[in-house]
Image (cartoon, rainbow, N blue to C red):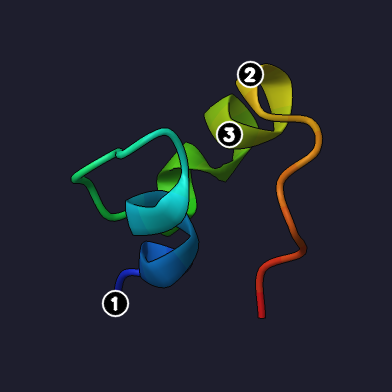
Amino acid sequence: DHIGGDWALQTKGAQVLIHQKDLQFVDRFYPDHPPFD
C-alpha cells in the first residue's frame, strides 16, 4: 500500500505517491513533512 499520497500530491506539485520504503528519503529531504498515519 502507498501512504502519504495526499501529502505528496499537495507538496510542490509532486505527482507521485510516497511508498513506505521511501519514508527515509522523505524524512531526509522534506524534514517538515506532516506525520504519516
Q: Residues within 10 Å of mark 1 (few under 14, many from 20)?
A: few
**How far apart are the two marked residues, 3 and 1, measured between alpha carbons?**
17 Å
**Which numbered disc covers residue 26?**
3
- Which kind of residue does numbered mark 3 sit on? Val
The single residue placed furthest to the left in the displayed view is 15
Placement of the N terminus among the 4 image quadrants: bottom left
Judged left or right of residue 36, residue 11 is left
Residue 20, position as x, y percentages in the image: 46, 57
Tell me: residue 3, above or below residue 16: below
Tell how many labels. Answer: 3
- Residue 23 badge: none
Dot 3 or dot 1: first in sequence order is: 1
Residue linked to disc 2: 29
| Residue 8 drawn at (x, y percent) | 41, 52
Location of residue 28 (image quadrant):
top right
* SS class, disc 2: helix
Which one is closest to the eye, mark 1 or mark 2? Answer: 2
Tell me what residue is drawn at x 42 percent, y 33 percent.
12
Name the secondary structure under disc 1: loop
Across and down, in percent, residue 10 comes to 42, 55
Cβ–Cβ under 8 Å for marks 2 and 3: yes
| Residue type at the position of mark 1 | Asp
Camera sees residue 19:
no
Looking at the rendered structure, which numbered label has been put on residue 1?
1
Dot 1 or dot 2, earlier in sequence: 1
Q: Is residue 20 above or below residue 12?
A: below
